[in-house]
Image (cartoon, helix red, strand yellow):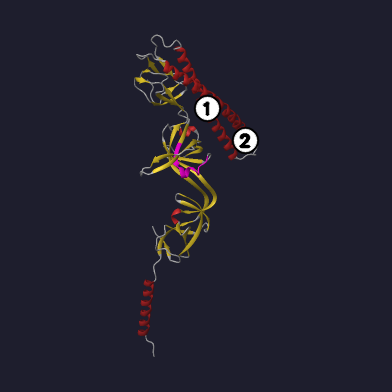
Amino acid sequence: MRITGRHIGIAAGALAVAGITVWFMVPAPVAVETAIATKGRFVATVDEDGKTRVRERYVVAAPLAGRLGRIRFKVGDQVQVDDSVATIEPSPAPLMDPRTRREVEERLGMAEANLERAKAVVERTQAQVNQANADLTRARTLAQQGAATTQTLERAELAARLADRELRAAEFQDHAAEHEISQMRALLARYANGGDGQPESWSVASPVAGVVLKVTTPSETIVQPGTPLLDIGDARDLEIVVDVLSTDAVEIGAGADVTIDHWGGEGKLTGRVRRVEPAAFTKISTLGVEEQRVNVLVDILSPAEKWARLGDGYQVDVQITVFAADDATIIPSGALFRRGESWNVYVEKDGRAELRQLELLRRSGRVAAVASGLAPGEKVIVYPSDRVAPGKRVSQRTP
């Protein structure tokens, strides 16, 4: 049979139809989003809101019953030691009756006990300051000789700053206790004769130097012994209080690194966990769910001049480091999914999806660290749909 051009055309057409049919029968690749596994430092954090507060706050209270005059101090005013912050005028009844006397004597005893404890704390913290300063001097000498690293010197400087801060706090408590004792003794001495005669007004003096943080009782009124009048503290000595879930608190330890963000100024501040309080409390979340929360106290380590405009009760965002690893294999958390009891990912290899079982090191927010099962540089499929399956053809989704 002679092959003509017509036969060739028919054969070519048949092949074209067959090719088109096969093309439409073969499933199209699934469009996916991919990310490359990287190698680097992985940090897991507990992220929460926090509030600043003055670390040592002294509540000035009425020493006895009477009529309180209007307090002239406003929030933010500077107060010096022994400044008169309030006056109590005589009441129609005697200003100090036997019951009030007993209360003052009890407060005097408590103040004396507080003073003993405060002096012991001052003595201990002074020794810590001396040791920290000696360590700092030694570190500086070694650094000048090239025998100590920059990190060693920075740690010594930090330890000296923290020790000095602890000493100032202890001295604050010591001065407050001494002032309370002198106030109570003066009150008892003034009425040693049982309060005969009409008593004069009593001046309430500030026990410490600082800033007025709160005026609890600003207007003229009748007060009883112990009624809070105003709060005084050092506005430059701030700490941050962060309440975290109790399940997160068990992972947080004293000395943990802290990053402070969205505080109102430029950049981020650094901090360190000073203490995790031992008792939890119940708090209702915004969704109406009861949660057990724990307060974590954070010291700000950045230079004070950088956050000088922070005040008492300011809100900040806090990230507390609970885990860190260098040279970790890091992938987006969105690439992970469960299959049975194991974690898995799809790896894009030669245009097809390959199922890979992993051993995770840790998850934190949007990223995860892989212990085994994946190498840096491999492509993982992020948020794989149910159309992705082992061996399935995939293609990079275009924006």
Earlier in the chain: of badge 2 and badge 1, it is: 2
Residue 291 is situated, as x and y percent measured from the top left of the image, at 41, 43
Magenta residues span 241-253
Q: Is residue 51 above or below residue 119?
A: below
Q: Quadrant of the N terminus?
A: bottom left
Q: Is residue 110 above or below residue 366?
A: above
Out of 206 and 276, give the one closest to the viewer: 276
Residue 134 is situated, as x and y percent measured from the top left of the image, at 62, 31
Name of the residue lying farthest toward the bottom: 1
Task: Find numbered disc 2 in the image and state the secondary structure of the residue it sits on.
Answer: helix
Residue 51 is situated, as x and y percent measured from the top left of the image, at 43, 36
- Does the magenta segment cover residue 257? no
Looking at the rendered structure, the kind of residue marked 2 is Ala
Q: Quadrant of the C terminus?
A: bottom left
Q: Quadrant of residue 65?
A: top left
Out of 247 and 371, give the one closest to the viewer: 247
- The numbered dot on residue 139 is 2
Out of 46 and 18, give the one closest to the viewer: 46
Residue 29 is situated, as x and y percent measured from the top left of the image, at 40, 66
Task: Find numbered disc 1 in the image and state the secondary structure of the residue it sits on.
Answer: helix
Pointer 2: residues within 10 angstroms few (<14), some, or many (20+)? many
In the rendered structure, the answer to whether residue 15 lies left or right of residue 248 reads left
- Does the magenta segment cover residue 249? yes
Asked whether the viewer can see residue 21, the reply is: yes
Looking at the rendered structure, the kind of residue marked 1 is Ala
Out of 198 and 68, give the one closest to the viewer: 198
Pointer 1: residues within 10 angstroms few (<14), some, or many (20+)? many
- As measured in the structure, the alpha-carbon distance from the residue carrying label 2 to the one carrying label 1 is 26 Å
Q: Residue at position x 57%, y 32% from top?
A: 160
**Residue at numbered disc 1:** 170
